[in-house]
Image (cartoon, coloured by chain):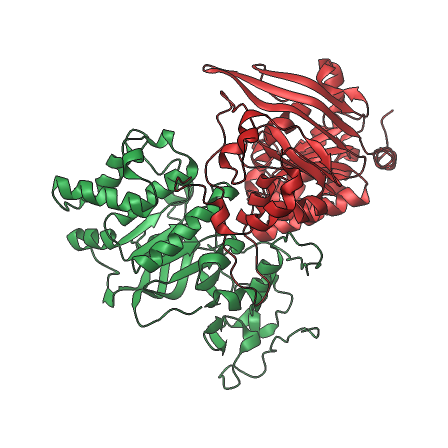
Chain colours: A red, B green
Amino acid sequence: MSMTFEALCTSLESKPPVRLQVQDLSVTYSTSKGPVRAVSQINFDVEPGTNFGLVGESGCGKSTVVKSLMRLLPDSAKVGGKVLLDGKDVLAMDRKALAAVRWTQIALVTQSAMNSLDPVFTVGDQIVESIRAHVDVSHAVAWARAEQMFAMVGLPAERLREYPHQFSGGMRQRAVIAMAFSLNAGLLLADEPTTALDPIMQDQIMSRIRDIQQRLHRSMVLVTHDIAVVSETCETVAIMYAGRIVEMGPTRDVLNKAYHPYTMGLQNAFPRIRAKGESKPPLISISGGLPDLLHPPKGCRFEPRCPFSTERCRAEDPELRPVGTVMAACHHIDRAEEFRRAALKAETWRVEEDVQ
Amino acid sequence: MSVETGDTVIEARDLKTHFKGHTGLISALLGGESETVHALDGVDLHIAKKEIVGIVGESGCGKSTLGMTLVRMHEPTSGNILFNGQDITHLSGGKLKSYRGAAQIIFQDPYSSLNPRLTVDQIIREPLDIHRIGTSAEKTERVAEVLSRVRMPPETYLHRYPSDLSGGQRQRVAIARALVLRPKLIVADEPVSMLDVSIQAGVLELLNVLSKELDLAVLYISHDIATVGYICDRVAVMYLGRVVEEGGSDDVMHTPLHPYTERLMAAVPSVDTSVPRQRVELQGEVPSPTDIPAGCRFAGRCPLAAELCHAVEPELYEPLPNHRVRCHLYLPADNDIPADLARPEFPENR
């Protein structure tokens, strides 16, 4: 006997949020030129019911982290460490256990998720299929759940009968988000969920995600390059650079009082809307580029681009260590106050006239 | 922020670019009419020397079509384009070619806009070859000059291939290629949206400096409103093929007049969360450009829309000096619109 709609909703809503603990996670891709360590021994915890932001630029390894949490990496990638979902290691699960966890415990929304809908089935049928793959309910009950999810993301229920091509990009992305929420997974992995969309749509979707996460008390890992979105969404943030977490802590603290020069540089480079009457601050870019991960530098990975680097930075790789309320991987956290002042000036960042 | 005007480089007058949409085979055989996409539907705009004008709007609003029409990559359906006061709307042949030398475009994706099999030297030299400008030695000199202008030392970069370059460096090469013909107008269509945040600033700053140093008029097209505030002197907001608000970039960003601009600005997330953002949900979707509604194009989604808005399309009114808006909220007192149509009113809280 399959569940009624009410029973389904009750069982889904009583699901607890998930605690995620990532311990010593490393990912190495083998390439024709040799092994590339895309993620090096990162550690972070997502407390149940909180939002965790993972910020970095392309190539820093943030999407690799997300894929390894879902075990979506190709076989050529060697993954080490532990990914504990409420204490159970995802990396050690067999296929069956993994299938039971995906979508019911962890759901994923990616930047290109809108293109993941199958063109030959209606959107409603696809959501129903994903629900019925995991819980024993009738088509009608699953359909009712899909209608409920559509309402939540602001789509009219009758559009469930339409095909993906009849949707605009923003509507398709919302449909995928509805699907990701349909089993009320305890942990949502959102990898640049709104990057491909317009600012207005971006804002509407992010505020819906925030509402739902808060109302249903879910956990989320939000991957983005947009520090403003993180600032509005996440309690905790980790800044990644070249496969490492270089700074991590409460979002407010990291963004107001950064200890790592990369975090300071990222904030300078981030365009924001000035307050009325505020003078035009210079946008300052960080010269240089990401290090070659085939041959990572011996010392700090940010050293070649860092305006404050010293002999020690070239020789020794800094560990992530606690300072105040945050953690930072920099040899000179004791000079952070001085760095923060210097970092606001454009000339500080003109390391040389080499450009990126 | 206003730059000396009077040196208008490019001017669009009631510019329209319509495209024929697709029809199915059956309907074509039966003589069915194809739909017309009103991508650009009556735009007036001018850009002076040393001036950077930003175009913002959602995707599909016609901002790229505007840029491509100005450089004559799309044929305008009606209206005029004036370049240094001369009508170039219908140029063809050799004259069009020389116009294209003077009006250059930079595209969004520096990974696909550069030929991977050519060196930086060959990429930048190609326009000179096509336009038969200079002897071989002069060409070499010009290539080196523009590379220095984009701050890439020629001796280091001349013989590299695009695959050896980072995204920011590739976009600089694309800018150098656009500069080599010594243009007067540059259309930059989302030039930094594919680049990482830490290097966007360098490319934007470069555009800014070049515009002032080389007397360039620049049209900067972007959906990222925050970047517009850094380099643009003026901003035009587009909605469904038309400019709905236009003015100095500070004025438009801080005192938006049009209800649409207001929502667009409110949608930009902020790093500083100590001041809560006034967020307003916008209902519905942008109407299809094949089926433009009567009246104001935004009326269907506008919370303030009244009877008049659904009936008559507003003109560009100028309620504040040099700040124009296409909205009936700012309807001047002396108008010839029938008084029985209900006017929209400002909400009480403003």
Near-viewer residue (A69 or A243):
A243
Q: Is residue B171 left or right of residue A172?
A: left
Near-viewer residue (A59 or B127):
A59
Q: Position of residue B80 (x, y in %)?
A: 30, 65
Q: Is residue B174 left or right of residue A10?
A: left
Outermost residue, left side = B135
Which residue corresponds to the image point at 67% horizontal and 47% vertical from the top-left? A257
Q: Position of residue A344 (x, y in %)?
A: 55, 51
Q: Is residue B9 left or right of residue B128?
A: right
- Can you see residue B256? yes
Which residue corresponds to the image point at 39% horizontal and 50% vertical from the top-left? B206
Which residue corresponds to the image point at 61% horizontal and 34% vertical from the top-left? A240
Count every numbered label the image shows and give the total. Answer: 0
Q: Position of residue B331 (x, y in %)?
A: 53, 79
- Can you see residue B19? no
Q: Quadrant of residue A278?
A: bottom right
Outermost residue, bottom side = B334
Q: Is residue B86 above or below residue B66?
A: below
The N terminus of chain B: image quadrant: bottom left
Outermost residue, front side = A311
Q: Is residue B192 above or below residue B252?
A: above
Q: Position of residue A329 (x, y in %)?
A: 64, 33
Q: Is residue A228 above or below residue B326?
A: above
Q: Is residue B316 left or right of residue B78?
A: right
The C terminus of chain B: image quadrant: bottom right
Which residue corresponds to the image point at 40% horizontal and 35% vertical from the top-left? B111
Q: Is residue A133 above or below residue A228?
A: above
